[in-house]
Image (cartoon, rainbow, N blue to C red):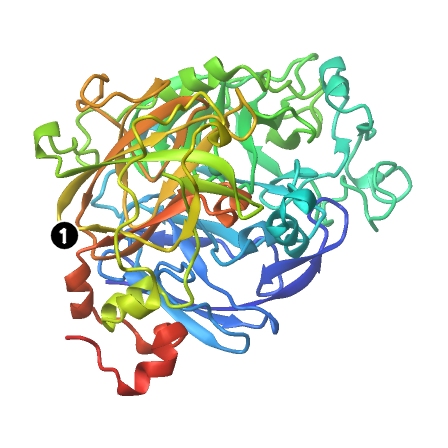
Amino acid sequence: PAKQNMTWDVEYILWSPDCQQRVMIGINGKFPGPNITARAGETLSITVNNKLHTEGLVIHWHGMRQVGTPWADGTASISQCAISPGDSFTYEFVADKPGTYFYHGHFGMQRAAGLYGWLVVNATAEQDEPYRRDYDGGELRMLLSDWYHDNVYAQAAGLEQKYDHFQWVGEPQTILINGRGQYDCMLGAVTRFHRGIDRRARTCVRGKEAKLCGDEERCLRRSECGPYCPQSQCAPVVFDVEPGRTYRLRIASTTSLSALNVQVQGHDLTVVEADGNPVEPFTVPDIDIYSGESYSVLLTTNHTPTFYRSGSFWISVGVRGRPPKTLPATAILRYTNSRFPWPGSPPPATPAWYDLQRSKDFTHRINARRNAAEAPPPPRTEQVNRTIVMLNTQTLVGGHMKWAVNNVSLTLPATPYLGAYFYGVQGSAFDASGEAPNGFPGGYDIDLPPANNSYETTLSDRVYELPHGAVVDVVLQNADMRRDNDSETHPWHLHGHDFWVLGYGEGRYTSGRERLNTEDPPLRNTVVVFPHGWTAIRFVADNVGAWAFHCHIEPHLHMGMGAVFVEGAHKIRELDVPREAMMCGVIRTTAAALTPAK
Ligand code: C2O
Ligand code: CU
């Protein structure tokens, strides 16, 4: 079996992702990090040199299941110690499944500092992706993110202040496509709709690329080169495509906060893959995507350029679900027979941000691809060994604003859980005196803010222990936040697994009474829980290791919105856990006397 070796230097770089220069975390001198393209079954060996000088570092391979290699999952405090400045660590794991993935930092808020990039796994010749025959034009990729001008240390410090000084990160300044955006600037004409979003938005003059470097760049005075200059770091992404073909467009979102909507002017999108799993194809004018999710959509270039249609089209990516204060990002789809390099009309407007029903309708349409070998049905409900209900709340703990699961806000220990089990030092590494709560009190009123419910929220690093092979259902139960009648959408991501999404519902989940889809539920690694609603998932705890399960909104995770599953606890000792990855916390101080608890 093939192996790909890579060496990465992770360092601070000065970069202008949205035409304004900031400090970012880059890899090998660039942002975003290198594109990884692997073949299914291939081993990836990535040596990460931490050249950040002042902070630790880990990299998580989002969507890789890490079967047999849980220490390569790249989660600080869970699967390994953060790599110290000056140190190196080699991640070695198998890219086991074809699909659309990405990688990102998983320590503090490093993801939001720009530490991310593509990880695409192609099918082997023998493995026929069920939609492989449906596109003949090749592949396009859009990695979506959002960008803040405040650095992540300021963001994290703001979140950690006591309540009076608590500072929410707010809305991002810019949406980025493949690491590029244009701050406070819309390419193309600003329509009345866009003006309504943000009056400060200024318009760049549309015109020919080459001419617009320098003089005519009116939008961004501080940058050396305007957004139309192809060599600038904030130049718009342009996809050159041939007419009359079908392309596979891979879209992934690693936003810090924003839920996004993607549309390609004049083109429908046929969804065929979600989080690396084949879905029953369906066609929509635009898609919603939450942080942590990925899709492949098929797009057919079926326009004939005419006097009115230039053959260039806007791809527009706007914010949904929160009052938009961030302008949509734009990229360009340009036919090779295009009459003009730029589209002749304004970018299409994003669907109304508050139209939650529209988002639900899209999400509910995603089901497993029928008769696909890669989309097995879930174990039957009678086989479920354990159901965990997870209440999502936002509340104050000791004057600090926190997010919590069943009134417990996750704090991460100094010793990685995986190492604690490997060396048999659970008791001194974290609170192993009991499990994290399996549910929440029956009397809890999800339609009232936590303060009106008399259950106290605490900080804890307890885990859920799942016996090897157990069939586990998790119900994410949304509730009111601190403000009455207010509830947010949270995209929950599970490490080490794909899970089946059994269903979504409104209000409070009633065990045994809800209609769940066990016929053709989609397999995913990230799923949303909608405001005031619930989401039910099922997975088989057959992957020995310690796995994070958390809201993929970076500030929410930072405020404790997560849980840890330890699977096959006593089998962890049989793994070949690399010792050097565990030398921190109580293991560091006692390691000399320790041998793995084999
Ligand atoms: Cu992509 Cu634990 O995250
Ligand atoms: Cu959240």
Tell me if residue 389 can be seen.
yes
Q: In the visual, does 48 lie left or right of 350?
A: left
Q: Give the residue at mark 1.
A: 468
Work out which residue is located at the far right of the displayed protein and give it: 215
Q: In the visual, does 175 lie left or right of 574?
A: right
Indicate the position of residue 123 as horizontal and vertical percent values: 29, 45
SS of the residue under disc 1? loop
Q: Residues within 10 Å of mark 1 (few under 14, many from 20)?
A: some
Please tell me which residue lies in front, 278 or 543.
543
Work out which residue is located at the far left of the displayed protein and give it: 382
Q: Does residue 596 sit above or below 416 in this rendering?
A: below
Kindly identify the amino acid type of the residue bearing the numbered disc 1: His
Indicate the position of residue 335 as horizontal and vertical percent values: 59, 28
Please tell me which residue lies in front, 451 or 190.
451
Name the residue: 19% across, 31% down: 372
Q: In the visual, does 370 lie left or right of 138?
A: left
Give the quadrant of the N terminus: bottom left
Indicate the position of residue 457 as horizontal and vertical percent values: 43, 42
Tell me if residue 251 can be seen.
no
Work out which residue is located at the far bottom of the displayed protein and give it: 592
Please tell me which residue lies in front, 57 or 564.
564
Name the residue: 46% across, 47% down: 560
| Quadrant in the rendering for residue 36 | bottom left
Give the quadrant of the C terminus: bottom left
Name the residue: 77% across, 44% down: 229
Q: Does residue 54 sit above or below 484 in this rendering?
A: below
Work out which residue is located at the far front of the displayed protein and give it: 454
Disc 1: residue Cβ within 8 A of ligand 1's nearest atom: no
Indicate the position of residue 596 as horizontal and vertical percent values: 21, 77
Q: Does residue 272 sit above or below 584 in this rendering?
A: above
* Number of marks drawn: 1
